[in-house]
Image (cartoon, rainbow, N blue to C red):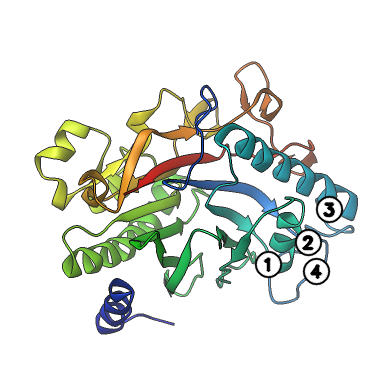
């Protein structure tokens, strides 16, 4: 469904009317933890004729079996449990990229004992069939609305951008989740696709700000670009420089990567990359409703998630070779205070 500006405004108006690995953060009713993780191809083992998923079958190129899927579920759920141990609770909002369908996502949640998650699953038209899956703690968070924007890349499909409107303790906030087109065939060739996605995301953010200068907006996902790239720095107008941000906060987003010394969330061709990002509007700096907590952002990992001398993410696959690891990305965490 293509969104008109009027439709975006209508949904927005309706909506408005309504931790660190090094330190333990003690959860309480005023703390909200969000977790984003590109989990690297969480597929079931069945061949879906509507998508290009045949390599993730027992007979396919990846020799993807129920046993390997079970190990994947166990590994992913283990890390979410570790986050719970370190922060005091499961993430209030859990968002995973590269999930094939609702069933495989719900199966993962079943590995998390005593969770109170409700899901808000949106299926995109990605040719491989991968989506962004979201779950939220239904005891403390209410989902008010959601709307998705299709990114039309001259007839090619990619993941949709989805806007969620939430409230927690009567504090309204918005979460915009993204998984932008990859760098397949090289950055230069694929960059126009990400610029197009960035413009689509920016139009949604601008619409929210038009309704309220103090809207609490969190922009999250795997952008396949880094904080200094054109799509992030110029189109989204996001900066990692807090002093620069505070000079004109209403016009910018603050990119939280400056809040940590972590080298990156993924590793490719011999270098660390900060593709997974969280950016926030100036509403999270006004000490009202939702606000950034101390030590708000981190790239989360434990020793078992590292591989090689450089400590890169322990991936499930390297090309067609099965490694049996967690993911080729580390998750990122964001902590907010509810006023």
Which element type, helix, strand or loop, lies under badge 1? loop
* Mark positioned earlier in the residue sequence (1 or 2): 2
Q: Give me the C-alpha separation between circle 3 and circle 1.
A: 16 Å
Tag on residue 44?
A: 2
Report if residue 149 is visible in the image: no
Q: Nearer the viewer, residue 226 or 331?
A: 331
Tag on residue 47?
A: 4
> Label 2: few (<14), some or many (≥20) within 10 Å?
many
| Residue 211, percent from left and from top | 19, 70
In which quadrant is the N terminus drawn? bottom left
* Mark positioned earlier in the residue sequence (3 or 1): 3
| Residue 105, percent from left and from top | 69, 60
Q: Are marks 1 and 2 in contact (CB under 8 Å)?
A: yes
* Image quadrant where residue 151 sits: bottom left
Q: Give me the C-alpha separation between circle 3 and circle 4.
A: 11 Å
Q: Which is closer to the viewer, label 4 or label 2?
A: 2
* Image quadrant where residue 258 sits: top left
Tag on residue 181?
A: none
Q: Which is closer to the viewer, label 2 or label 3?
A: 2
Q: Are marks 4 and 2 in contact (CB under 8 Å)?
A: no
Q: Is residue 300 above or below residue 53?
A: above
| Residue 175, percent from left and from top | 40, 59
Q: Which is closer to the viewer, label 4 or label 1?
A: 1
Q: Residue at 36% of width from left, 37% of height from top?
A: 293
> What residue did someone put label 1 on?
101
* Mark positioned earlier in the residue sequence (4 or 1): 4
> What residue did someone put label 3 on?
64
Q: Give me the C-alpha separation between circle 4 and circle 2.
A: 8 Å
Report if residue 19 is visible in the image: yes
* Mark positioned earlier in the residue sequence (3 or 4): 4
């Amino acid at each position: 469904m293509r969104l008109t500006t009027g439709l975006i405004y209508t949904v927005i108006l309706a909506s408005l009317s309504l931790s660190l690995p090094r330190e333990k953060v003690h959860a309480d009713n005023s703390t909200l933890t969000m977790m984003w993780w590109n989990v690297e191809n969480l597929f079931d083992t069945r061949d879906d004729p509507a998508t290009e998923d045949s390599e993730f079958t027992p007979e396919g190129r990846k020799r993807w079996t129920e046993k390997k899927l079970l190990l994947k579920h166990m590994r992913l759920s283990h890390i979410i449990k570790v986050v719970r141990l370190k922060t005091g609770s499961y993430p209030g909002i859990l968002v995973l990229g590269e999930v094939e369908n609702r069933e495989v996502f719900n199966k993962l949640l079943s590995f998390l004992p005593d969770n109170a998650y409700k899901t808000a699953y949106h299926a995109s038209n990605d040719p491989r069939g991968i989506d962004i899956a979201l779950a939220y703690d239904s005891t403390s968070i209410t989902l008010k609305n959601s709307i998705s924007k299709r990114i039309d890349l001259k007839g090619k499909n990619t993941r949709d951008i989805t806007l969620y409107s939430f409230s927690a303790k009567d504090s309204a906030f918005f979460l915009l989740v993204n998984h932008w087109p990859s760098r397949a065939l090289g950055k230069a060739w694929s960059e126009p696709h990400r610029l197009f996605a960035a413009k689509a995301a920016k139009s949604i953010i601008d619409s929210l700000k038009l309704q309220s200068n103090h809207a609490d907006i969190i922009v999250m996902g795997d952008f396949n670009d880094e904080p200094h790239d054109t799509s992030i720095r110029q189109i989204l107008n996001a900066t990692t420089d807090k002093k620069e941000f505070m000079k004109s906060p209403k016009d910018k987003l603050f990119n939280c990567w400056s809040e940590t010394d972590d080298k990156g969330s993924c590793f490719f061709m011999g270098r660390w990359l900060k593709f997974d990002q969280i950016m926030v509007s100036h509403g999270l700096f006004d000490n009202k409703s939702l606000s950034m907590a101390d030590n708000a952002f981190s790239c989360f990992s434990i020793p078992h998630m590292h591989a090689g001398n450089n400590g890169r993410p322990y991936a499930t696959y390297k090309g067609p070779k099965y490694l049996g690891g967690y993911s080729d990305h580390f998750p990122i965490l964001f902590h907010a205070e509810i006023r």
